[in-house]
Structures are given as structure tokens and as C-alpha cells.
């Protein structure tokens, strides 16, 4: 169970791979559970 959920903002065009823009629309969340001492990165893509 997560105590805190953070939405990570986009990194901008500087972070895009030079060859191809495979997934342009995605969302990244960081879930932190202090009691379980666990951090989870959740990535969801819009295809």
C-alpha cells in the first residue's frame, strides 16, 4: 500500500531518443510505502 503517490512531469524534447518517438504520450507515477519500505515506479502509455 502506498502512503504517497507522485506524478512525474514530462522531461521535454531533450529527453526524447534521437532515432524515433515510439511512445509520445505516457504518464509516470512514483508510489512510496513507508511502512513496507517500498518504492514503485508505474508507467502507463497511451497508444
Image: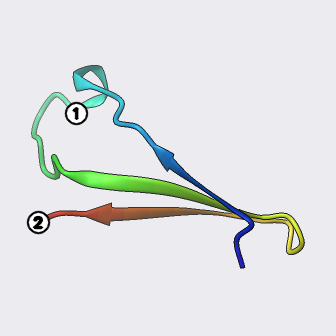
Label 2 SS: loop
First reached walking from the N terminus: tag 2 or tag 1: 1
Measured from the top left, where is residue 17 in percent x and y? 22, 33
Measured from the top left, where is residue 18 in percent x and y? 16, 28
Q: Nearer the viewer, mark 2 or mark 1?
A: 2
Determine which quarter of the picture holds residue 12: top left
**Rendered residue at 86%/66% (across/down):** 37
Sort mark 1 into few (<14), some (14-19) or many (20+) by Cα contacts within 10 Å: few
Name the quarter where the C terminus is drawn. bottom left
Measured from the top left, where is residue 15 in percent x and y? 31, 28
Q: Which mark is residue 25?
A: none
**Rendered residue at 34%/54% (across/down):** 27
**Rendered residue at 13%/50% (across/down):** 22
Q: Which residue is mark 2?
A: 47
Sort mark 2 into few (<14), some (14-19) or many (20+) by Cα contacts within 10 Å: few
Residue 39 relative to residue 47: left or right: right
Residue positioned most to the bottom: 1
**Rendered residue at 10%/39% (across/down):** 20
Callout 2 touching callout 1 (CB < 8 Å)? no
Q: Which residue is mark 1?
A: 17
CA gap, disc 2 and disc 1: 18 Å
Determine which quarter of the picture holds residue 16: top left
Name the quarter where the N terminus is drawn. bottom right
Residue positioned most to the top: 14
Label 1 SS: loop
Amino acid at each position: 500500500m502506498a502512503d504517497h503517490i507522485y506524478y512525474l512531469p514530462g522531461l521535454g524534447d531533450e529527453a526524447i531518443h534521437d532515432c524515433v518517438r515510439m511512445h509520445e504520450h505516457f504518464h509516470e507515477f512514483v508510489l512510496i510505502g513507508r511502512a513496507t519500505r517500498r518504492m514503485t515506479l508505474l508507467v502507463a502509455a497511451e497508444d
